[in-house]
Image: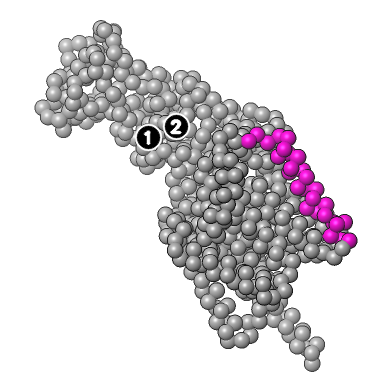
Amino acid sequence: MRGSSRIASVSREEGQARVAWIVFAVAAVISIVVIVVAGSGQTLKGDEWGIADRLATEPLLHAILHAPPGKYLIVLPTVFYKVAFSTIGIGDYLPYRAVGMALTAATAALFLVLAARRVGSLMALPGAVLILFLGSSGEVTSTALRIPTQVALVAGLGMLLLLERRDLRADLAACGLLLVSITSHPLGTAFAVAAAVLVLSRPAPERWRRAWVFGAPLVVFAAWYVTLREPFPVGPSLGEQLRELPRFEIQSLAVMAAAATGVFHWPTGHLLTPLSYAIAGAIVGVTAARALTTRVPAEFWAVLAALIVLLGAPAFAPGGARTPEATRYIFPGVVMLLLLLAELARDVSFGTLRARFAGGAVAAVLLFAIVCNAIVLEQNARMWAAAGSQLRAELTALDLARGHVGGLFRAEDPTVPAPNQTRSFGLTAMGYFATENDFGSPALTPAQLRLEPPAVRQAADFVLARALALHLSPVPSMPPTGDQPPRVLAATATARPSSRRGCRTIRSSGPSRSVQLELPPGGAALVGANQQRTQLALARFGDYAVPLEPARSTRIALLRIPPDADPMPWRLLIRGSSRPIEACGL
């Protein structure tokens, strides 16, 4: 009788596991479709460009071991980028997004396996689906920007799974995965702490004989950290960081609680609210009660230790934007928080009415969180797509300016006020051209650029005008003019041929009157444009978004335009002149 009951229980669990994996697979496909469709148009951004620049200008080993100041040791991701950049190039971003989506799915699948061993497949399923749709961590789930983080997380979760077997072969594999994790991103140190807890909790003398499982990867990481790492030149002292650590831990837990339960203000993503702090406090209370009143397994302490390290580690990270709300930290933090919740529910019987009600409430909260995060996931994918289109247009401008632009020019310069700068491209023109020579470019062709929305075309115009240093230069006398005057495209003022060859005279009877001129390839000379109320603006691919400052000190000024590979002419808008202005082709 007892054997039949056990067989029925096993059969029921296997059936639930099959259902859970089918639902998980469907959810994974849906999340991928959402990200692919909404995020079409993305390209490299942020740190990816920095890695591409280093790989184009440095040997692979040097690029791995000698990261820029404040950057990390990311061995396997750097090797991946080198192979991918050298084979498929950087023109098409979809392969990199596919890798990012695969790593997200692998993270969710590993969580499902680990959590199912604690609470069963059906109870673990909502958490796994939430990971697939975790839009509150948009830098990880909606783009491929954080592949190093994902590699470290997948390797770390795989290590936890292997250490549960407690045999030599599994321990060797776990050591290898921990080495991959800790040398792919510093969050691997959290998994090193978890491995130490799991191994040292084993009976003596096994705990000491297997200390190499976590000791060897830590020694490798420490050797690099001490000998080759270049510290960030400016930052808070260690004492200041330690004083800030408790506050940082609390805020980080509140952020993870908000992301894991959906109680955040989307789409702005403001995660620190009174409700998120209340949920974080409840998690702390339940965790403390469970640890103090019951005998918990080593896996509980391992997950708890890893979560504490993950929540606090960014407080010691160099550079800016290292706040608890930074979306790059939410993904690993939520995964480990969900694992902790699974540990808290380990061995809880859901046969009683109270337990079923509690389980249903948790499932309802996670369903709410999935919906909220899915909405933000789609919005983030569209945001990255829009930023990608604009960046590709800016790179088109750099390509057109090649041969004329200075090597230290930056398309997205934080010191230059510009409309809609994405701040996702940190390379100089010299760095970009070196990267382009080796790996290609995602830049749009001029023909493709002409089909983009106005804001994208305007961004290209703004960068191109800056790269070519287009400006009015005062001259003492009129230079020789061309045979053809600037062509009138549209006018609410009078624009007639003047007595001077190749020139037009523009007369305006009011401040709102304007003339749009198509400029000859070499540029134009303006006579009388130094009036106080005259407004000048340039455009090429987009609308008139590039202001042109009049040369107030003289009546004659030249706008010289260097030639490039695209025949589309520049256009000039003249508005608000109270006296005649003469525009002459050069």
Dot 2 lies on which element? loop
x, y (%) of residue 504?
20, 18
In the rendered structure, find residue 413 and report the number of the disc placed on it: 2
> Which residue is label 1 attached to?
418
Q: Amino acid at mark 2?
A: Asp
Q: Is residue 29 visible?
A: no
The vertical placement of 55 against 258, above or below, is above
Q: Amino acid at mark 1?
A: Ala
Seen from the viewer's position, the closer of residues 271 and 459 is: 271
The vertical placement of 286 against 391, above or below, is below
Farthest residue to the bottom: give it. 1
Q: Which residues are magenta?
A: 205-231
Going from N to C along the chain, the mark reached first, 2 or 1, is 2
> Is residue 303 shown left or right of residue 248?
right
x, y (%) of residue 230?
65, 34
**Is residue 47 inside the magenta stretch?**
no
x, y (%) of residue 426?
51, 34
